[in-house]
Amino acid sequence: MTHEVRAVVALHKGAPVSVETVLVPDPGPGEALVRVEACGVCHTDLHYREGGISDDFPFLLGHEAAGVVESVGEGVTDVEPGDFVILNWRAVCGQCRACLRGRPWYCFDTHNAEQKMTLAGTGQELSPALGIGAFAEKTLVAAGQCTKVDPTASATAAALLGCGVMAGFGAAVHTGGVGRGDSIAVIGCGGVGMAAVAGAKVAGARRIIAVDVDERKLKWAERFGATDTVDSSRIDAVEAVRSLTGGFGADVVVDAVGRPETYRQAFYARDLAGTAVLVGVPGPEPVVELPLLDLFGRGGALKSSWYGDCLPSRDFPALIDLHLRGRFDLQDFVTETIALDEVESAFDTMRRGDVLRSVVVL
């Protein structure tokens, strides 16, 4: 059986997205059909629309999603019809060298559904964003991309763990290793950076410094747990972070922007043995130059964070539990809820920095 659904598609590079009729097949072996309830609008979707990730158009956009499993294919045992799930874009294989060494969050052979979703009018195969394609009433994914969580959580809140919130939380807590009594600076307070701020608060950080050029975002950061804010359009961010940490620099600095200038700030704003974490996704062209003597002399660690070094089966249920206990309010990240046909306008809102997250509700 084939399912005919409405979905948001980027047909051509740089062109406005459109709502199209898409055909979704029944799940085959190892696959799951999911009825999408909510999906966040992420910068990565805009990168796909702009051709910044690949030229494999047309793209079925949307990847930060939660919904209910409708049916599963042969051999699927971890989820079943009726399960409330968050979708993830790193279904671990369990067999690669990272998985076998007990580091599945680095899995080198993550997988997606084998069958393709297609445009109803032309039969053209679609490339689902991050192997998910969830700006759709239903989507087909690998069963390993479904993580079962407590169904009492709202879909609009749960969906955000599928990408941005998990990336920011994990960058601070997993990759950066921020813990009780530590200091942390977060450069860039969009959705990912704000999640790093909130994650540091959950982890018990003593000083949480939010850095941005937008006063609105700095005020939001205080709500999420920032103890201090730095407007880097007015003062030097590195000097400000050092001043707030006794002249030493922060134990952990998260760059949630991904530009050469913010990465340099992260490098120099950390303590001598501190950790700099890059979680903001850079473009293909920027280059960072740092004196080799400074790299040697400052010590510490420079890390990149993929998806917050998360393990969905471990982290999604745990963070949903924290949310339901009032310790990590995912709903605070939801600025507005929108319909499928409002995704293009949500991209404009996101560019202006007016939201943390717009969430499509189906």
Image (spheres, rainbow, N blue to C red):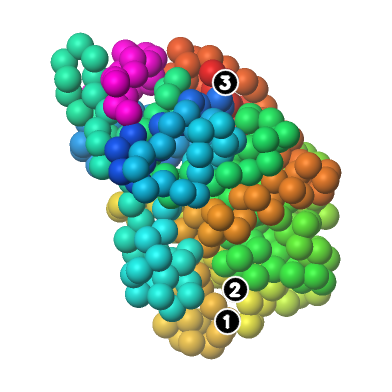
| Residue in the picture at 68% in, 41% down | 150
Magenta span: 1-26
| Mark toward the viewer: 3 or 2 | 3
Counting every numbered tag in the picture gives 3
Q: Disc 1, disc 2: CB below 8 Å? A: yes
| Disc with the residue nearer the chain's start (1 vs 2) | 2
Q: Can you tell which mark lies on residue 275?
A: 2
| Residue in the picture at 74% in, 70% down | 179
Q: Disc 1, disc 3: CB below 8 Å? A: no
Give the SS element for disc 1: loop
| Disc with the residue nearer the chain's start (1 vs 3) | 1
Image coords of residue 355 (percent x, y): 62, 29
Q: CA distance from mark 3 to mark 2?
A: 38 Å
Q: Is residue 266 visible?
A: no
| Disc with the residue nearer the chain's start (3 vs 2) | 2
User: Quarter of the image holding residue 209?
Assistant: bottom right
| Mark toward the viewer: 1 or 3 | 3
User: Quarter of the image holding residue 216?
Assistant: top right
Q: Can you tell which mark lies on residue 300?
A: 1
Give the SS element for disc 2: strand
In the shown orientation, is residue 144 left or right of residue 86? left
Q: Nearer the viewer, residue 236 or 273?
A: 273
Q: CA distance from mark 1 to mark 3?
A: 43 Å
| Residue in the picture at 63% in, 43% down | 149
For residue 173, above or below residue 358: below
**Amino acid at dot 3:** Val
Q: Which residue is mark 3?
A: 361
**Amino acid at dot 1:** Gly
Image coords of residue 207 (percent x, y): 80, 63
**Amino acid at dot 2:** Thr
Q: Nearer the viewer, residue 133 or 115?
A: 115
| Residue in the picture at 34% in, 43% down | 74
